[in-house]
Image (tube, helix red, strand yellow):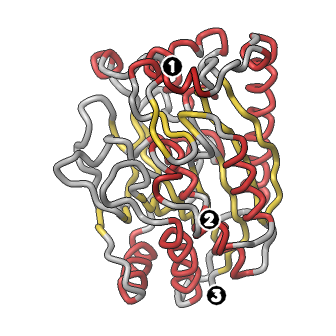
Amino acid sequence: MAEIVLGLCTSHGPMLHIPPEHWEQRVISDKKSSELCYQGRNYGYEELLRLRSPGFEAQLSLPFQQEMQLRAHRAIEKLAAHFKAARVDLAIIFGNDQRELFLESNNPSLAVYYGSEILNAPASKEQQAMQPPGIAMAEHGHCPPEPTIYPGAPSFGEHLVRSMMEEEFDVATMTNLPQGSAWRNGIPHAFGFVYRQIMRDRPPPSIPIIQNVFFPPNQPTSARSLKLGHAVVRAIKSWSGNERIALIGSGGLSHFVVDESLDSTVIGAMRDKDETRLAALAVNELQSGCGEIKNWFPVAAAMNDIGMSLEMIDYVPFYRSNAGTGSGMGFAVWQ
């Protein structure tokens, strides 16, 4: 009988792999955005700067930023050690797409990839030139230097899809990765980060589950993301194999605006196994990058089902501007 042996959630983001002295590259994009989500509504940069005055001078010193990045890297190393120790045969990864696979012309709310091969490939120099400021500098965090193929899990993936359909989830399916964006190749960075940083480019067979947590109008609700986790547990219980399975969430916590209050609410509710509190988080509270928090919810719900408890390895807020832009970086394990 298959067994869930590990739950793991990790933030990802370019600031983890850009030297802090270059974090201001990401502020260039912040200043052009009108969709900086903070406490349930979107702001432009100048409006957010006025709202959060007097700012975050202490958090913007280079030594402080370097220490925050070092803490995050130490947490990632611990997650990688937990993964290695769990001797995982099969991984299910919950992540999202940011116009890497799916464009506005076709953007499913929920998709499962169950092809036999998973491509992770770096962008060409021409593609890097098309990326937002700072992104190319961070690519090594989620892409190997050469195109790399990881193993998929087609048989289990088909079983998972059939089980989810019986649970009334309308699932888009893929056995090949679409061409997608002109500036990225292969699996989205939410998954590439896990393969590179947690699995060290030696992953077991895996199933990427892609939630559209970023782009209206078909984002899943918090409650729906929690139900997804329960459905995945039931699919595993009905599977005929005997694999040791890990469930992994990639994304979040708050970004592109650091909201330590929101992050504390989410972490506290997961620690208390309070799904009612998590389900009450509305779509407008989890817009843009903050929507990636919902990649944690299926893991938290599944771990509740099997009686595992949350251990926060670390929570590290990465501030990059006086408007409070940046990312709340969280690293957690259930076992």
Does the rendering let one see residue 157?
Answer: yes
Gap in angstroms between the C-alphas marked 2 and 3? 16 Å
Side of 99 where 225 appears, left or right: right
Element assignment for label 2 = strand
Image quarter hosting the C terminus:
bottom right
Q: In which quarter of the image is residue 15?
A: top right
Q: Of the two numbered discs 3 and 1 on the same chain, state the one appearing first in sequence.
A: 3
For disc 1, the marked residue is 26
Q: Residue at image x 57%, y 21%?
A: 49
Q: Residue at image x 63%, y 70%?
A: 245
For disc 2, the marked residue is 247
Mark whose residue sits in front, 2 or 1: 1
Does the rendering let one see residue 89?
Answer: no
Q: In which quarter of the image is residue 59?
A: top right
- Mark 2 surroundings within 10 Å by alpha-carbon count, few (fewer than 14), some (14 through 19), many (20 or more): many
- Mark 3 surroundings within 10 Å by alpha-carbon count, few (fewer than 14), some (14 through 19), many (20 or more): few
Q: Is residue 114 above or below residue 239?
A: above
Image quarter hosting the N terminus:
bottom right
Q: Which percent across, then down, holds residue 168?
A: 37, 85
Q: Quadrant of residue 243?
A: bottom right
For disc 3, the marked residue is 1
Q: Of the two numbered discs 2 and 3 on the same chain, state the one appearing first in sequence.
A: 3
Q: Which percent across, then down, holds residue 264?
A: 75, 50
Q: Which of 151 and 294 is in front in this view?
A: 294
Q: Of the two numbered discs 2 and 1 on the same chain, state the one appearing first in sequence.
A: 1
Q: Which of 53 and 97 is in front in this view?
A: 53
Tag 1: residue type? Answer: Arg
Side of 96 where 175 appears, left or right: left
**Contact, mark 2 vs mark 1 (Cβ under 8 Å):** no
Q: Which percent across, then down, holds residue 45?
A: 48, 22
